[in-house]
């Protein structure tokens, strides 16, 4: 399919050359200017597509903000105290 697109774009540029009265093949400086314009146009379209894709991409989903005053995460591990049911639990006389 790329060959068809290349052929069609070449045909379009050939029509443009004919309308502008340029020789085909063009003199070296005109041909280089045309190639530079084609490369610049290709890069412009590529950058524009990337910009529009990034702009239309869905935003990352984040957790809703907590309304309580207690933090939901701490950097220190939570330690729970456990008592052994042994001799230390008995009241001393």
Image (cartoon, helix red, strand yellow):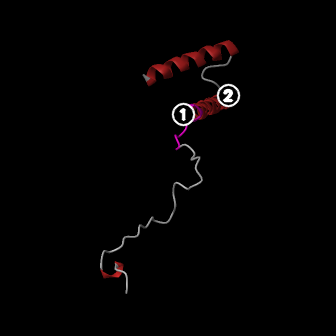
Q: Position of residue 32 (x, y in %)?
A: 64, 32
Question: How many tags in the picture?
Answer: 2
Residue with the most extreme bottom position: 93
Per the image, label 2 sits on a secondary structure element best described as: helix
Disc marking residue 13:
none
User: Which quadrant of the view contains residue 50?
Assistant: top right
Query: Spatial distance from mark 1 to mark 2, Cα to Cα?
Result: 40 Å
Disc marking residue 57:
1
Residue with the most extreme right position: 20
Task: Indicate whether 86 appears above or below 28.
Answer: below
Q: Position of residue 26 (x, y in %)?
A: 63, 24
Residue numbers of the magenta segment: 54-63
In front of the other: label 1 or label 2?
A: 1
Classed neighbour count for the residue bearing mark 1: other residues with Cα under 10 Å, few (<14), some (14–19), many (≥20): few
Quarter of the rendering occupied by the N terminus: top left
Left or right side of 85 for 13: right
| Disc nearer the start of the sequence (1/2) | 2
Task: Indicate whether 71 appears above or below 93.
Answer: above
Per the image, label 1 sits on a secondary structure element best described as: loop
Q: Nearer the viewer, residue 64 or 28?
A: 64
Picture residue at 67% right of the left edge, 28% below the top:
30
Q: Which residue is mark 2?
A: 30
Main secondary structure type of the part rendered in magenta: loop
Q: Position of residue 23 (x, y in %)?
A: 65, 19
Q: Is residue 39 magenta?
A: no
Q: Nearer the viewer, residue 82 or 29?
A: 82
Q: Position of residue 13 (x, y in %)?
A: 60, 19
Q: Is residue 57 magenta?
A: yes
Classed neighbour count for the residue bearing mark 2: other residues with Cα under 10 Å, few (<14), some (14–19), many (≥20): few
Q: Nearer the viewer, residue 26 or 93?
A: 93
Quarter of the rendering occupied by the C terminus: bottom left
């Amino acid at each position: 399919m790329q060959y068809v697109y290349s052929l069609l774009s070449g045909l379009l540029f050939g029509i443009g050359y004919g309308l502008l009265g340029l020789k085909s093949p063009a003199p070296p400086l005109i041909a280089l200017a045309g190639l530079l314009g084609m490369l610049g146009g290709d890069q412009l379209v590529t950058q524009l597509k990337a910009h529009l894709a990034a702009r239309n991409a869905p935003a990352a989903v984040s957790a809703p903000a907590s309304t309580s005053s207690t933090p939901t995460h701490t950097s220190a591990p939570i330690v729970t105290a456990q008592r052994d049911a042994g001799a230390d639990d008995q009241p001393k006389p």
